[in-house]
């Protein structure tokens, strides 16, 4: 199912990473609301709580989509957690202008408790677990029992958990994440993502036993 075709976020050369927050009345904010509603419909019976956002390659809009969708969900009074599980190229902390010396990697290496690593925001009940310092062994950390226990604990507390991840075709991290999250949304960038890569990504996710609940086509012309 195509959840939505998103427009370009940039306007007059301005970078607008968090448009759902900075401009609640814009057309693109409305588009994120539509995606939110479509996800709610698709997950009504399945009670999807943990959703992994990925794409075949780099720079297709995963982090931007996670951030804006999370804001949109939090504005609807949901208790939302973003986990930045792109431990190689993290970006969530910079989108939300958060400090990142403690985060997911510190929890996975037992340096901090999950609760103390979570950052609150001033956007409804949106909370964020940034990546933390870039570790040497991201795949190992994301495949560990500590990570699955963290997800289990988080699902008791939050209505929705959105997970940002590395490109599924580039590293093994995302396959491990997909296997633990079950529900996945694929972000494809108009004019950039190749059809064969999208098909391959779909196959890889199937092998990881994840359900592809939808596709977002980012930045259509
Ligand atoms: N719809 C969009 N319109 C304009 N710029 C976008 C859009 N989506 C993403 N970008 C920009 O493209 C770049 C890559 O996006 P990002 O979300 O970091 O991709 P990924 O996480 O897949 O690597 C960022 O500079 C971001 O601001
Ligand atoms: Mg990213």
Image (tube, rainbow, N blue to C red):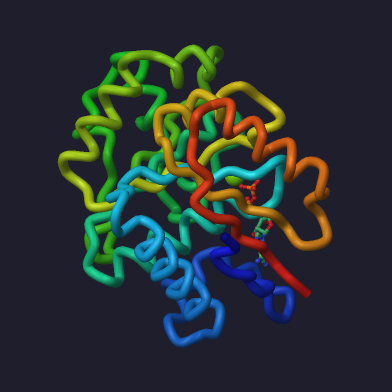
Q: Is residue 105 above or below residue 1?
A: above
Residue 171, image x and y in percent? 65, 24
The quarter of the displayed image where residue 77 is located: bottom left
Q: Residue at x 73, y 45 (%)?
A: 198
For residue 113, above or below residue 136: below
Given residues 84 and 153, the one toward you in this image is: 153
Image mark count: 0
**Which image quadrant: the C terminus?**
bottom right
Quarter of the rendering containing residue 71: bottom left
Instruction: Out of 180 and 147, give the one closest to the viewer.
Output: 180
Give the residue displayed 24% in from the left and 62% down from the top.
Answer: 78
- List the single residue furthest toward the left: 156
Please state, as top left, top right, bottom left or bottom right, where the N terminus lies in the image: bottom right
**Residue at x 42% of width, y 81% of height:** 24
> Residue at (81%, 49%) from the top-left corner?
195
* Image coordinates for residue 218, horizontal then vertical, percent: 66, 63
82 shown above or below 29: above
Left or right: residue 31 versus residue 117 is right
Q: Position of residue 197 (x, y in %)?
A: 78, 41
Q: Which residue ends up furthest to the front in the rendered image? A: 45
Q: Position of residue 118 (x, y in %)?
A: 27, 40
| View quadrant of ligand 1 | bottom right
Q: Is residue 110 above or below residue 50?
A: above
């Amino acid at each position: 199912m195509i959840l939505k075709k998103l427009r370009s976020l940039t306007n007059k050369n301005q970078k607008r990473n968090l448009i759902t927050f900075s401009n609640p009345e814009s057309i693109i904010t409305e588009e994120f609301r539509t995606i939110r509603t479509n996800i709610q419909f698709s997950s009504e019976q399945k009670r999807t709580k943990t959703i992994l956002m990925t794409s075949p390659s780099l720079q297709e809009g995963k982090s931007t989509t996670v951030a804006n969708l999370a804001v949109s969900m939090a504005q609807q009074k949901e208790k939302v957690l973003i986990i930045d599980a792109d431990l190689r190229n993290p970006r969530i902390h910079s989108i939300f202008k958060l400090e990142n010396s403690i985060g997911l990697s510190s929890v996975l290496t037992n340096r901090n408790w999950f609760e103390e690593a979570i950052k609150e925001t001033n956007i409804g009940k949106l909370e964020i677990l940034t990546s933390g310092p870039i570790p040497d062994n991201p795949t190992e950390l994301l495949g560990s029992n500590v990570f699955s226990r963290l997800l289990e604990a988080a699902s008791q507390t939050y209505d929705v958990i959105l997970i940002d991840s590395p490109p599924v075709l580039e590293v093994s991290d995302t396959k491990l994440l997909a296997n633990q999250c079950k529900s996945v949304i694929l972000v494809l960038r108009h004019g950039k993502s190749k059809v064969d890569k999208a098909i391959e990504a779909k196959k890889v996710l199937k092998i990881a036993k994840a359900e592809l609940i939808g596709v977002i086509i980012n930045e259509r012309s």
